Image (cartoon, helix red, strand yellow):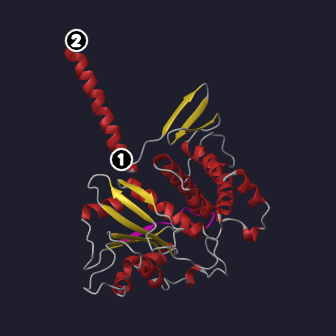
Amino acid sequence: MRDSLESEILEQIKQRFQKERQWKTTFGNIKPIISTEGNGIRVVAVGNDVLYQSKSWKTFPDFLFRYIWEVFGSDWIKEQKSQPPESLHTLIKWYRSFRKFQRSQSEGKKESIIEFYPNGATKALVSLAYDLFTVENNLYLPPRLLQRLRNVQQFQGARYELFCVCALLRGGFSVEFEDETDGTTSHPELIATHLTTRTKIAVEAKSKHRQGILGMSGDRIPDEKLRFGKIGQLLNDAVSKNVNLPLVIFFDVNLPPDSAKEFLVSSSDKTLKVIESLPQTDDLNDLFSFVLFTNHPHHYGRDDETDPYRIYSGRIPANPKYPIINSLITDVTH
């Protein structure tokens, strides 16, 4: 009897560890989703003490669509509704595209849950909501970051910083937001500490602005005419920060997928030339330790096509002032 009980307990422990490993393999080193249902009401926990509930949620994205509007706030939503189409926030444009796409997928179908591949706007909307949830569930949402996300002109940079925070959390780092209002010194946007090795890194998040895209002013250039453009100034700004730590730079090129592939994969010497042109120390050491080029082209997809593919490409300098071990780079890019 005792041996049988011990075997049962050991099997339960084994299954629990297997589920935890599977979760981390799929979602990274973040807390699992805490959710339960009772009396027909679905309850989802966010952080330590915030609960959301509804009778109508059938899937986790159902919760996310409610959650994101709670985060942005009812006053902000009312303000957006009064804006002319040309002044609408990117988030509102994504949501309207999603609703149109959702109706096209559900037309004539009677199922309560419908499976479909998302278009770019749908994926952008769900990804933003999930990243907000991930940060609040595992860390906290800084008021200044939310303020920037609500601002149509600052949204692009804030959204990319949010992505970087989530990437670090999933890679097994704790994250500290630096006080960007402090003008007394130059400092990076984030400080991250690896939970296993306790190694600290400084992090800069840069996203290339393009006119008429993601809330930027000016007439939009046709996708087929977009080129990579000058990025040296943005990278120079990143390496100029006053840090005595390994510096990791996240850089989103913000291009249609095929153009990004041409730059980051087919013509990799272009990125190397940009990196080699960056300033060094008097001892010819590079001021950064790793740069990760990304491309998240959700907003380049048409409403009637599936989400465009993404690309990532990393570069390690020849002589970094503060080298970091390869395993940390793997965790950063998880």
Determine if residue 301 is in view.
no
**Which residue occupies 37% across, 76% down?**
265
Mark nearer the N terminus (1 vs 2): 2
Secondary structure at badge 1 equals helix
Choose between 154 and 220: the one closer to the eye.
Answer: 154
| Magenta residue check for 305 | yes
Q: Residues within 10 Å of mark 2 (few under 14, many from 20)?
A: few
Residue 155 coordinates in the image, percent (x, y): 60, 66
Magenta stretch? 301-313
Report the amino acid beneath label 1.
Lys
Q: Is residue 277 above or below residue 105?
A: below
To which residue does mark 1 refer?
A: 24
Residue sticking out furthest to the left? 3
Determine if residue 46 is in view.
yes
Q: Is residue 135 above or below residue 50?
A: below
Specify the label residue 1 is tagged with: 2
Secondary structure at badge 2 equals loop
